[in-house]
Amino acid sequence: MSADVPEAASAEEQKEMEDKVTSPEKAEEAKLKARYPHLGQKPGGSDFLRKRLQKGQKYFDSGDYNMAKAKMKNKQLPTAAPDKTEVTGDHIPTPQDLPQRKPSLVASKLAG
Amino acid sequence: MNCSDESTYGNKADIISTVEFNHTGELLATGDKGGRVVIFQREQESKNQVHRRGEYNVYSTFQSHEPEFDYLKSLEIEEKINKIRWLPQQNAAYFLLSTNDKTVKLWKVSERDKRPEGYNLKDEEGRLRDPATITTLRVPVLRPMDLMVEATPRRVFANAHTYHINSISVNSDYETYMSADDLRINLWNFEITNQSFNIVDIKPANMEELTEVITAAEFHPHHCNTFVYSSSKGTIRLCDMRASALCDRHTKFFEEPEDPSNRSFFSEIISSISDVKFSHSGRYIMTRDYLTVKVWDLNMENRPIETYQVHDYLRSKLCSLYENDCIFDKFECVWNGSDSVIMTGSYNNFFRMFDRNTKRDVTLEASRENSKPRAILKPRKVCVGGKRRKDEISVDSLDFSKKILHTAWHPSENIIAVAATNNLYIFQDKVN
């Protein structure tokens, strides 16, 4: 019995190794799973699509903002980390967090 | 191997987001992230320099779309021009459609080279004259003036898309056009802006069940009842508008069978089709997914007739490309006028051309250092392993922030336009 088990295990390992050698994609997948073990089961599915469909969503509630300002009085409201693009949770966005929406006043450099 | 974008680009608004020749190739339009359109015109070949090919000079530029904020949905609407499509010329003026994520606009570009002079009620500066001082009557005459090109918005087709518009396509009947977003496709009549017909709707009743989105759509070049749309799952559907008002059921379904043992986490992502184009003949469609370009015969649904590898060496870099989001880059593809050569972009400012007849392919680079006027483009090569030859570039040295997503091919001549971030390159076949 103990003689059989190591053989079966090595056959499986061998197939896995073969997979990695013959398919660079599978090797990359293994790399990704090693870095992000909690990555979802349905990769191309709902998560990506929903993120794609929600592009452009900004969360700014003037009520929350003013209430927070009143509570904090003179203190500064906590600002989002500069690299955060999605503002959710405890952080209350300030007008400074939302990027300026001004049309281009300058002509395109192609036309110059 | 990062995809940094801040300082490399300079002004972000200058990033070109679409390039399109008109039907004669006389005009070339570009749209950018800042919502502006720049139109180039080919200069007429003069009799003196009959062998000198016409060059493209700036003809007109205008602000097509402006940034908006939808307060009801807390949605920021980018002014970036996603697509430009020309209408065939029917009179002296030029017409084009330009679209951002939410609104399609019809622009009229016309020339003015005469000006009326000799008004009765206005003086030469345009100020109103005192009627009491007018004692004679004269007829204003048209006098020549410096050429002025003006662009005016003739129609605004708004409020018809909940999701982001990825494609517009003018029908061969020249009366209608379609606009496609992630989940729906609408049919418009050019004259009517307050109504559109929904012809495709793939939104599931429960959004949790969403598995695929529409990525591109195009009308058949000759059959006004036929169109195709591609999906994020790598499939193409051909629909016939004569069959029913709502074309949710396709007439043809194009999908290449996948080997299940080859399936990985990345399979579906890299199979997502980023562009679909009919051949000029109308007999074939070309699709672009992350690593390949495929040509399909409309009469064969179960697999493409040709598959071309654009940059297969990226297959061993998918993990990093996923982390820096490059795996989601949407490359376009184009046919040449005779449908014999296809072209698409890649990274490091490389673009690739595939000759369907000779099966030869070439990699070229669009960069300032390599493109002096009249210089001949040198083919480039990416080294995938082992010894790197002198002129080759290794995969790890590729600059993934320099991506060529948008290219265009003149309808009849060998002239191509290549958009490299915020620069536009126009290459022409050399004159013998």
Image (cartoon, coloured by chain):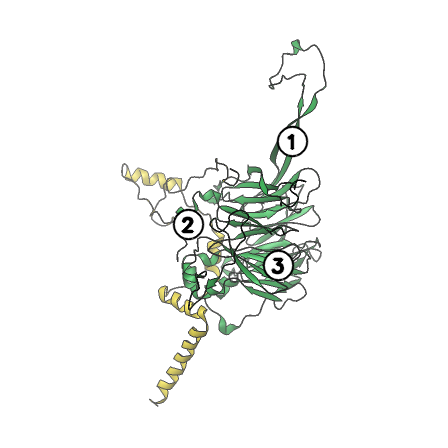
Chain colours: A yellow, B green
> How far, Cα to Cα, is label 1 from label 3?
39 Å
Return the disc, 1 or 3, that comes first in the chain's sequence.
Answer: 1
Residue at figure coordinates x 63%, y 54% from the top left: B218
Return the disc, 3 or 2, that comes first in the chain's sequence.
Answer: 2
Look at label 3 and name its amino acid: Val
Task: Give the class, few, some or many, for how many residues have Cα within 10 Å of label 3's Cα (few <14, many ≥20).
Answer: some
Residue at figure coordinates x 32%, y 44% from the top left: A79
What SS does tag 2 mark?
loop
In the displayed structure, B28 sits above or below B232; it is above
Reading the image, the residue beneath label 3 is B341
Q: Nearer the viewer, mark 3 or mark 2?
A: 3
Position of residue A8 in the picture relative to residue B174 (left or right): left
Look at label 1 and name its amino acid: Arg
Measured from the top left, where is residue B44 in percent x and y?
65, 40
Q: Which mark is residue B112?
A: 1
Residue at figure coordinates x 34%, y 47% from the top left: A82
Badges 3 and 2, same chain: yes
Reading the image, the residue beneath label 2 is B5
In the displayed structure, B159 sits above or below B377; it is above
Q: Pick the residue in front: B115 or B284.
A: B115
Q: Is residue B8 visible?
A: yes
* Picture quarter with the N terminus of chain A: bottom left
Residue at far left of view: A75
Look at label 2 and name its amino acid: Asp
Q: Is there CB contact under 8 Å for labels 2 and 1?
A: no
Give the mark count: 3
Q: Pick the residue in front: B13 or B9.
A: B9
Q: Say which chain tag 1 marks.
A: B
